[in-house]
Amino acid sequence: MSKISFVIPCYRSARTIGGVVAEIQDTMASLPAYVYDIFLVNDCSPDDTYEVIKALCAAHDNIRGISLARNFGQHAALMAGLRKSDGDIVVCLDDDGQTPANEVGKLLEGIESGSDVVYASYDNKKHSAFRNFGTWMNDIMTRTMLGKPRELHLTSYFAARRFVVESMLRYENSYPYIIGLVLRATRNITNVPVSHRSREVGTSGYTMKKLLGLWFNGFTAFSIFPLRVATATGVMFAGAGFVYGIYTVVKKFVNPQVPLGFSSLMAAVVFIGGMLMIMLGLIGEYIGRIYISINNSPQYVIREETGGKESADEDQVE
């Protein structure tokens, strides 16, 4: 009998996580071929999310609660849950009820059909325009820099085989990016169509700052494509400057009365200087992240665990 581990990062979900857990329980009752457990990771939510998680753990033996010491972000919270899970298949989904837990059977069927990872895809997403824009930009980034196939849709609702999860857990640096870790482990990935629900409570926790941070994690941790773009741009400008220099010299010899253009020269200097600063900033971003990783900055810090076997160390650092 296969075991399914559900991993759910939780943030501002005190009013929704109970419904998500109940839906998982009802759905798994109709799938007797599997046993399951649930890992709820509180990402230092400012409301009483962890109190709700503790109540759920007290009521059900197969639910585990993990509380992080500060807000580390969704991907770090997922990594914390993945490290605690031991299922043959791991299913990750959201805490707000928008990802339909009652359709998990479709993802499991995809795994049983031979796929290593199965992502839910939505015909009609119920996110806000801002979130949909962020998803579109993330899709472009993953296709360009991580080599994601165009036809593959990546979402926060997916199922993965155990060996894929173990491969992901070998990544111990400070900036986890789940999509990059999955694509690094396997390309045997498929989509299954599921419905997407409207958010009933609250708003998305993703701000523009968090989305930008997520994109930076993706291309600085798993791709050197931006550095190659910077190199190609530098070569292009160097070549253009060389050609323009030859043109200026020839023009001066052909018509000595033509004055050299100060305005065009300043425009070129300012433009090229700006490009150089952008490239240096990009290189600095890579170097800064390397520095933080060398200093062993943790992906997350667990403050407390509840449910099942309690952690002996309340301040365990991963």
Image (cartoon, rainbow, N blue to C red):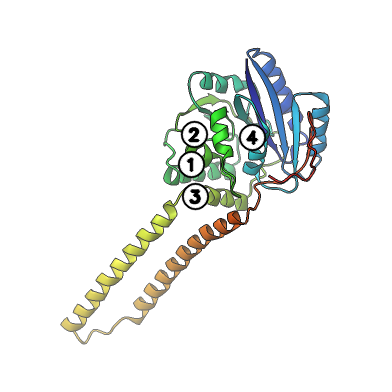
Residue at image mark 3: 219
Q: Earlier in the sequence, mark 1 or mark 3?
A: 1
Q: Residue at x 33, y 63 (%)?
A: 235
Disc 1 element:
helix
Q: Earlier in the sequence, mark 2 or mark 4?
A: 4
Residue at image mark 2: 153
Q: Marks 4 and 3, Cα distance to the nearest angstrom?
A: 22 Å
* x, y percent for residue 51: 83, 36
Front position in the image: 292 or 50: 292
Q: Earlier in the sequence, mark 4 or mark 1?
A: 4
Q: Marks 1 and 3, Cα distance to the nearest angstrom?
A: 12 Å
Q: Farthest residue toward the bottom?
A: 257
Q: Farthest residue toward the left?
A: 254
Q: Residue at x 61, y 53 (%)?
A: 209
Residue at image mark 1: 139
Tally the marks: 4
Q: Amino acid at mark 2?
A: His
Q: Is residue 15 left or right of residue 282?
A: right
Q: Earlier in the sequence, mark 2 or mark 1?
A: 1
Q: Marks 4 and 1, Cα distance to the nearest angstrom?
A: 24 Å
Q: Amino acid at mark 3?
A: Phe
Q: Amino acid at mark 1?
A: Asp
Category of crowding for the residue at label 2, using alpha-carbon neighbours closer than 10 angstroms: few (below 14), some (14–19), many (at least 20): some
* x, y percent for residue 244: 26, 72
Category of crowding for the residue at label 4, using alpha-carbon neighbours closer than 10 angstroms: few (below 14), some (14–19), many (at least 20): many
The mark found on residue 82 in the picture is: 4
Q: Earlier in the sequence, mark 4 or mark 3?
A: 4
Q: Marks 2 and 1, Cα distance to the nearest angstrom?
A: 8 Å
Does residue 128 appear anywhere in the picture?
yes
